[in-house]
Amino acid sequence: MSSSAAVILMAYGSPDRIEDVPAYYADIRGGRPVRPELLDDLAERYRRLGIEDGNPLNEITERTRAALQAELGLPVFTGMKHWTPRIADAVETALAGGAETLVGLVLAPHYSRLSIGGYRAQLQEALADRAEMLFVESWHDEPGLVEVWAERLRGTDAHVVFTAHSLPARVLDEGDPYRDQLLETSQLVAGAAGVADWSFSFQSESPTGEPWLGPDILDHLDALHARGVDHVLVAPIGFVADHLEIRWDLDTEAREQAGELGIDLRRVEMPNDDPGFVAVLAGLVRRAFAVPSTA
Ligand code: FEC
């Protein structure tokens, strides 16, 4: 790794204050109209999670960035997909500091054109060939990541449900590897943890008026209940940190539904800035430097 290298650590981003929610939601919608009732509902979810006292995702991302920088001994800059500092801001800061090679790493392990592909497009556009770009395309089968999840599941006798963010179902017609990669991670983690009783479901689908990938966790809980399952341990392998989709969609909504069904639902801790997880990120960056650029 040369001394003129830097890492752009990319995360989804999250509003810092309740007043930021309209601009944040508009950014996620990318210019398409926002229905006022959905905006109100989103602001209410953030309010109930206590965003006014601090935002978990942005704070965790900053701690992860600092730990990765210390581990690598290289400058690491955070770039958010939907909030500030933007991916473009991180690129400018890195270039101003003299970086000649940038490694892009997304804090989401599974490739979709709508997920990692979008981060990559923002990075490439911001960089505009002003430095060499290396990019970690996906890391869903990274042995260290598999172990981070497996150690959280070993010894459980609950039915394990792996979850990930849903996407519009049309991505499958476009040959998107997202769902296959999620199922592969689930299989690898279950195998490493010695868990035989598991299933997979999506979560957090948005009401955009088109079909999304399923089953959704809430329907899936109904199906598990019908099968007589009464202990569920959720492992949200499609994410790496605590945020709205974990704390609201799983810890609030799914837990409420499970309670009504008489299911004891628990969730494993997210990797966040766990040192073992930061070591996995560092390994991905080191390996990216060893592989010729594809940008
Ligand atoms: O804590 C926070 O404030 C941010 C939590 C958050 C994460 C996250 C991750 C992913 N999303 C993915 C795809 C979509 C698609 C749409 C969409 C919409 C939202 C909305 C919020 C939101 N997402 Fe998100 N996502 C997070 C938050 N997401 C808020 C808008 C309101 C709502 O629907 O609840 C639909 C866009 C549209 O309307 O057209 C698609 C994917 C991930 C996981 C990969 C990654 O982290 O990049 C995929 C965290």
Image (tube, grey):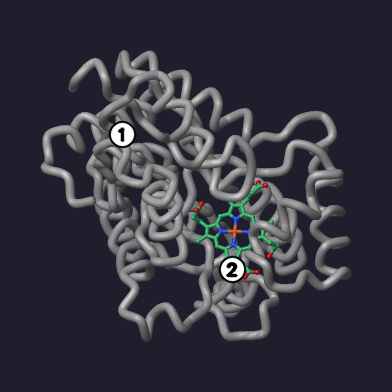
Tell me the residue that label 1 is attached to: 102
Mark 1 residue type: Leu
Which residue in the structure is indicated by mark 2? Answer: 217
User: In the drawing, does residue 148 fall left or right of residue 160?
Assistant: left
Q: Relative to the observer, which residue lies in front, 197 or 93? A: 93
What residue sits 29% from the left and 36% below the top?
131
The amino acid at mark 2 is Ile
In the rendered view of the protein, which quadrant contains the N terminus? top left
Q: Quadrant of ligand 1?
A: bottom right
Within 10 angstroms of label 1, few (less than 14), some, or many (20 or more) residues?
many
Q: Assess mark 2: CB under 8 A from ligand 1?
A: no
Left or right, 82 with reference to 3: right
In terms of image quadrants, where is residue 220?
A: bottom right
At numbered mark 2, what does the secondary structure look like: helix, strand or loop? helix
Q: Is residue 279 visible?
A: yes
In the rendered image of this protein, does residue 277 appear above or below residue 265? above
